[in-house]
Amino acid sequence: MRALKDEGVKFLFGYPGGAALHIYDAIFRQKALQHILVRHEQGATHAADGYSRATGKPGVALVTSGPGATNAITGLATAYMDSIPLIVISGQVQSHLIGTDSFQETDMIGISRPIVKHSFIVQNAEDIPRIIQEAFYIATSGRPGPVVIDIPKDKTDPSKLFQYKRSKQVTLRSYQPRVLPHPGQIKKAAKNLLSAERPVIYAGGGVILGDAHKELIALNKILKAPVAHTLMGLGAYPSNDKYFTGMLGMHGTYQANMAMHNADVILAIGARFDDRITNTPSLFAPKARIIHIDVDPASISKIINANIPIVGQVKESLIALIKEIKRSKLKIDSDALESWNGQISTWRTKHGLNHDLYLQKTKSKMILPQVVVQELYHATKGNAYVTSDVGQHQMFVAQYYHFNKPRRWINSGGLGTMGFGLPAAMGVKLAYPKHEVVCVTGEGSIQMCIQELSTCMQYNLPIKIININNEALGMVRQWQDMNYGGRYSASTYADSLPDFVKLAESYGHVGMKVTKQSELRKTLNKAFAMKDRLVFVDVYVDPNEHVYPMLVAPNGSMQDMWVTKNIKA
Amino acid sequence: MKRIISILIENKPGALARVVGLFHQRGYNIESLNVGPVFDGTYSRMSVTTRGSENDVEQITKQINKIIDVIKVADLTEGEHHEYEFILIKFNKLKLAEKIQKILKPLGGRMLEKNTKVIVMSAVGSSSDIEIAIKAIGRGNLVELVRSGSLGLHEGEKVLTI
């Protein structure tokens, strides 16, 4: 407990069980840390993860051995894919029972190995403070990631006391995460960027994790290049800036994807050329020289070869780059940039996001999911912390809720974990009780961790849940519409959905249901006026609505997109 | 192409599993693997042989480097290096003893055990020499074969150490 307190931990998200009972007794006898009892260990890991994404500090989950540990696995994998500093402390059976298939025994270190940055098993009780200190250091430095600490029950035996030791600084001979960018590479990058005629900045979650959004904005004050964000990067560069093109990739905007495909220089920052971005790698950005800044050398030239690799912390690298650009005799080519930014405006006008939406809106009597997000943006004045689950609703938020600040958009990007949104929102709300926290979800995703409504009651967490209900697994249905001749294999369940209003009420919360466009704004305003209550707004939307644009796959490049149901651009 | 990757890794529980697991996780194969503590015993040196393109091996070494317990990694095949492998063989066709001894002579073949039933011998050489020798003996003539996997280090003054 003391070691956790010394790391600045305020909340422990957890669930007790036999192997963790000594630890739970210690929690009972202290006041510095608040324990949040979830209803399923997956919820604990996502809540700690959400807390971390919103605050930048590591989140901590505490689970017992066996099923407690295995239930934490999805949360670990989620954090691993998005490089989130998450600490999972798992109880383990007593040391002498390890390997004997004893009650609630599972090899947590073995099971979690491929999805953690590092893991520890405690062999001596007096090592616990050092291990906790090292775990936090590893989780938060370099490319961040989750760390597991597995503690056999006998190592927390309260009858065995020892001297508490904490070192001033952690040093590990096998781990030196701090790398400064190579000055020669920075020089080359500056030269390429300044002489570019069609540059694009492709910025990912690393900009947020590396706390470098201010440097990114400062850099583009000089470069005046279009900026495209990955799903994880949204919020780092302000959406209301004129150089912002929106998200890129699978469901990115037309102008962002076209800009990437036609660019002559791409500056990739804290992004990893995921297959949801590049589409077919061999057809990716054929005219571009690639400059790639990343703290993790393994991310560079993994999928797309970088012409100018820069290994370094994003923040330090951008500072160095800005300095070099200011010092350089070269100046940006204003004429070329003006015509390039003009081209992007033309693309935006042609197939930008709102292009067809309002036309359809007048025809459709049903609520369009995109409109729900736009109304949500107005109701919250664009200032909310928004968490989401995974699927169509997630893409609609990414496209239509314009994030202007980092750490406001909290979703599972890499792993795509349904069930993430509600527990993540709990973590955010605990961190920022005075801010509006909204979980945008779907009727599929919300049912994967719906039990956490009970946790929200216990700790009085007045989150707003917007359930975009199309009575089907929407993204699966979309693919089945597009690629499987509309055969809805295992993606519909309209006749067996719960009454979400009653469900929310049975947990002691407020439930609301909207089916008409005309009632949407009113209902949302009513929900947000209830400051001290969790409100579950069940919004029935047009089930036939798809997410567009959508990259044509397989064998497509970034310029091959479906821009609406019938138009391929 | 065949590659020898040398890894210095903390001698901690589970450290070896992290390296082996990574090969599987990232879709690469381990052809041979050798590991043992060196110097003060706080760390071990591993020699892993694998096959892959230059890009593959670059990605493998980068990923291995990310393992927290790994202190250093080098792809020996990038430059000049020594590569040796140690084998033990057992055979029971005693009339072949002379032939096999002759084959293994350039590989420092040593007789470790000889009785009326079996002969056990050892030999050292580059993996390709070992392959040739085993082929010359005839796989069917051996009842048992143990290979250490390739061991390697840089030629000249270049060293891999902490």
Image (spheres, coloured by chain):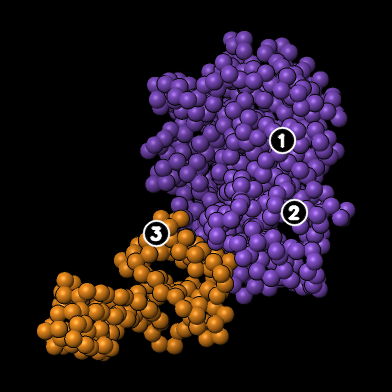
The chain painted orange is: B
Question: Which chain is the one coloured purple?
Answer: A
Kind of residue sitting beneath label 1: Glu
Image quarter (top left, top right, bottom left or bottom right) of the C terminus of chain A: top left
Q: On the picture, is A360 further left or further right than A319? A: left
Please state the horizontal and vertical placement of residue A285, each as a whole percent of the image. 45, 45
Residue A21 bears which disc, if any? 2
Q: Quadrant of residue A145?
A: bottom right
Is label 3 or label 2 in front?
Answer: 2
Q: Is residue A299 above or below residue A481?
A: below
On the picture, is B94 further left or further right than A425?
left
Q: Amino acid at mark 2?
A: Leu
Res A214 visible: no
Q: Secondary structure at mark 1?
A: helix
| Residue B7: image location, x then y, percent | 47, 73
Which circle, 3 or 1, is nearer the viewer?
1
Q: Residues within 10 Å of mark 3 (few under 14, many from 20)?
A: some
Distance, label 3 to label 1, CA atoms, is: 40 Å
Label of residue A511 in the image: none
**Residue A180, above or below A395:** below
- Quarter-wise, where is residue A536 in the image? top right
Residue labelled with disc 3:
B28
Residue shown at the point (63%, 36%) measured from the top left: A419
| Foreground pick, A16 / B35 | A16
Q: Residues within 10 Å of mark 2 (few under 14, many from 20)?
A: some
Left or right, A325 with respect to B102, comes to right
In whole angstroms, how far apart are the C-alphas of marks 3 and 2? 41 Å
Of callouts 1 and 2, the N-terminal one: 2
Q: Which residue is mark 1?
A: A452
